[in-house]
Amino acid sequence: MTFERRRQTQTAEYWLQEFAVHEQDVEYLYEWFLEIGEPRGIGELALKTVEHRCHEEEEALSRRSDGGLIYQPVDAYGVGQRLVFPALDYAAGQVLAVRKGNTPRHGTFSVIKVQLDNEEAPREFAAELSSDHVLDDSVLRLQESQNLLSPEQLYELYGQSTRELLEEALLQNKDFVHFDGHWFLPGLMPEVSPYHLNIAEAIVDDHRQPLAISQLLEGFEETDWPSSSNISVRAYALNYAFSQDPRFVDLGNPDGLTWYLRELIPPGARHKPVRLAPMHRAQGGEWLSRELHEFVAELVDQADELERPHVVEPGNGEQVQFYLIYPHRREGSLPLSSQALRMLPERPADRFMVTFLDQRNGEDIAGWMVPGEGYALGLEDWYRRHEVPVGGVLELRQGDAPFTFLISHEKKRRKADWIRQARVLDGRLTFSMQRKALACRHDKHLLIDGGPADALDGLWTNAGEECRSLLGYLTILFPELAKLSGQGWVHAWTLYSAVNLTRRCGAVPIFAELTRQACFDPVGNGNWVYDETLRNVVYETPEEMSRRPKSRCQDLIKDRVDQYGTSNEVWGP
């Protein structure tokens, strides 16, 4: 029979349970960095660690096998001989004594007492056995074996856990630095002094746009910064220095890092404006009528999206149409729904610069996108110059150049018409009808002239105690809007647009209140009426919401209700 020792590094247990990063591994990588002189990723460092462990094991086995005879039970041994035991992880030891032994199975044989180098108490082993034994004719294979996995194969199998443990160890070691997934030795990097960082700041400030590291390196050609070092090392040193300086921020680029000055980023791109942060948003499971479900789908409000993944798969997002509500009109922003985000093949950073092109005249408009928060900035002046109203219909299209987007609105012949005018009187929001000429296509239900921005700004943060709940606010706004209609009707879209004059709110929370509160009644074509006498009556079950037993307009109730964002049973009259 043949005995073949299986190396520890060839087992899953070794890499997944026993492996830990030792000081010798770190020293090996340190010496390797001194040899290659360039930054490397954690994957390559982990592979080198696997190679090092395999090499160390082979050397250890070679040293042990050279330390004496390979123990085989059939052989005879004398006192003082050195033996190596493959079955004991190639432990070596010296024979201390030999005595006779006898068993019915094996007959007469010898028993040798051996002091192993790595143990305190001696052990006894059989020798001069005449019968077959599992170790007979053992074959030691140290350097070559067809069954051995290469370090590359071992890394492919167990590399993830090795990378994680190695990265954790290197993060705690001050002899290494890391940036953008790459590691290096600080002692091998050229010094980036405050003087050099000030020069870089001046270069970016002069260009007023994010710059790649290659562009910044060109600006250092006339300085005393060493130009003889490896270009990748120089780039790494500069990138690392920027990452440690709060003045600089990486805005990303599909081709690599780009650096900009934090102070040049508009405040609205650095921090989400309060007017764009929803006070009320969809949670999923709200009961809505079929018609209201259709309205939600048409409005495409990001506050109604139940999930906003960090990564949206690219798709057919060449163009998207949206309605401008007051918060975006006030901030000069536009909404980035999941559909709009499909126009971005990849997101280079949390926030990045883009160029909006006026589709009519080709005008360049510098803007910013903050996809994770669902908005873009930079259109405040464009909205004002083109008199785009709240309720205006806009279209965003993907441009030909990267990070370029065409923005447009459909012009129409200017014609005076009656529109809703919002005003603030004695700290409360009121509405009236005013004649005004508009030249931009819009939705008549969403159309509201907000008037002076300062007045609405005051209500945004000081709306009054009774307005804190959404229902309370709806019961205040509804009568104000209803007086503009001879029938006392208010369209659901109008209520949604009016609420967003003083607080950011998705359509779903508003429509859910219309559905469950008995004081609101549908009268057809998206219009609703309000009955103050039913102010405290709530429909508790979906059947009640659907049939609306308290309604005075039973002959007009023809819709059903179902839950938003779920596949629950549909309830109908």
Image: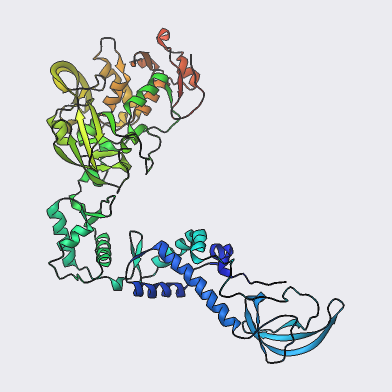
Q: Residue at x 23, y 28 (%)?
A: 394
Please tell me whether residue 479 is drawn above or below residue 278 in the rendered image. Answer: above
Residue 368's image quarter? top left
Q: Is 106 or 350 nearer to us in this picture?
A: 106
Q: Residue at x 48, y 22 (%)?
A: 540
- Residue 111 placed where, x, y %? 77, 85
Position of 117 with respect to 252 (left or right) is right
Residue at the location (40% across, 35% down)?
306
Please state which of residues 297 and 253 is positioned toward the viewer in this rendering.
Answer: 253
Left or right: 524 as drawn, with respect to 427: right
Query: Between 492 and 440, which is closer to the camera in this rendering?
Result: 440
Confirm whether residue 457 shows in the render: no
Count the labels in the image: 0
Residue 550, position in %: x, y? 44, 13
Query: Residue 276: percent from the left, percent from the top?
Result: 27, 37
Of all residues, the one furthest to the top in this rendering is 555
In front: 462, or 567? 567
Above or below 190: residue 464? above
Residue 297 appears left or right of 361: right
Tell me the colour scheme of the image. rainbow
**Quarter occupied by the N terminus:** bottom right
Q: Quadrant of residue 478?
A: top left
Residue 490 in picture, x, y percent from top left: 30, 17
Q: Quadrant of residue 312?
A: top left
Residue 470 visible within the image: yes
Residue at the spot 25% in from the left edge and 14% down from the top edge? 483
